[in-house]
Image (cartoon, rainbow, N blue to C red):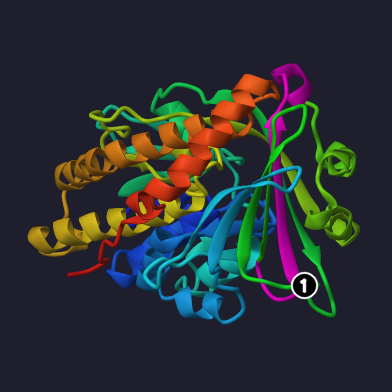
Amino acid sequence: MALDDIDVSDKVLICGGGIGGLALGVALAKVGIPAVVLERGEQLRSAGAGIRLQTNAWHALEQLGVADTLRKEHIRMESLEVLRDNGRYLGGATYRDDEENRGVVRNELIIALAAQLPNGSLYLSSDVQSVKIDERGNGVAVLRNGKELRPKLLVGADGVNSRVTKALGLSSVTYSGQVGIRAIARFKEGIPNFDRVTRGIMGGPNGEFDLLFPLTDKIMYYASVFSLPEVEAKTFNNEKALQYLHSNAKHIAEQFNIPLWLSHIKPEDIYAHQLKDRAPDKDKAWGKGTVTLIGDAAHPTTPFLGQGGAMALEDSVELAAMLNSMTKSEGGWEKASPQAIAEALRAFELKRAPRCHDMVQLARNNGAMMCMKRSWLGVLLRDLFIMVAARLTRVSFYTNWDVKLAA
């Protein structure tokens, strides 16, 4: 059935077929709420090469029914090490049995989620040109051909530059002062000197932070972030990113084997982007009427906690759980009134806002520390902080999340 022919008046319309949008479509199907996912691309989005998923993300993926599929191929990490670019060890941690950290090939995550969607609920090449909110607080999605879709509930899962966010009048994202590079290196015969360690490497004249860890026994994830003036960041593309990685390798100790990883990165497996964020207000809902947001559309963040994808997964489970509870009290989705839906959406947003605000802020602060430009005092203070923090804190304080989709 063509998109022009479907009736969405009794459905949830999800704008965006990334991690958050697909996850929400799956979550809603599991609680019996009909949904349609619109993705503007001809293919599902997989930009970013790889993604780090920590304990909270795996709890969400279990609720969505895809965790075990992804675990079969992707390596569980045993420990974290933070080092200087000269090889000096600064700090680290051995993960406990209840801490699950794995890197996942982003495209495989997308495919696994899409496979769980009901037939006929995903539409590709479906570009939402604009979104408006009518006088009753209902969302209206306007397609490229001018057709208007008026769903029972509209969700913006359309990323950092969300059209739904714009319709809600939220502030624009802020450039963090840094750019990021994500890449994967593929080894047909297996990763040399393979181990289950995530390594963060700090140093370099531009305040570089590099991250290395295996996704599988044959695929290594390599990310690099560094400070760059915004005027230069606007033209920083994948080609420049690969050139930068080769140049930056000169500053990193030989023990990290950076030239080896770079020699196995294909042009199609590298992704460069500006780092931007926007922290939601802690005590303020971000939606209106029967319109809400999830993922980067609601709370775009920098990657310095490794929580962007996880927050989108959390959003999808919590929103579906909230709507499921509301539906039961209303006697079914068909009977749910716009007022009841709006109340459920505000409850969802106000529950999520404090956690998401803190995550965005913490990631921003981490980025400022990790990408500190080289000065003897700044580097000394940063290194001391890392050595002390590694001994006194655990990552679990922000990965401690486990909401059930249905009671």
Q: Locate the C terminus by quadrant.
A: bottom left
User: Is 379 placed above or below 299 here?
Assistant: above
Q: Is residue 228 magenta?
A: yes
In magenta segment, residue 378: no
- Residue at point 32% right, 32% down? 286
**Could you say where residue 363 lies in the image, as x and y percent from the top left?**
48, 37
337 sits to left or right of 209: left
- Residue 35 vs 253, above or below: the answer is below
Q: Residue 65's quadrant in the figure?
A: bottom left
Q: Nearer the viewer, residue 45 or 200?
A: 200
Residue in the picture at 31% in, 57% down = 401
Q: Is residue 145 visible?
A: yes
> Which quadrant of the figure has residue 359?
top left
In this picture, residue 210 sits left or right of residue 400: right
Q: Quadrant of the N terminus?
A: bottom right
Mark 1 lies on residue: 193
Circle 1: element type: loop
Q: Which residues are magenta?
A: 215-234
Q: Residue flagged by tag 1: what amino acid is it? A: Asn
Q: Position of residue 94 (x, y in %)?
A: 48, 64
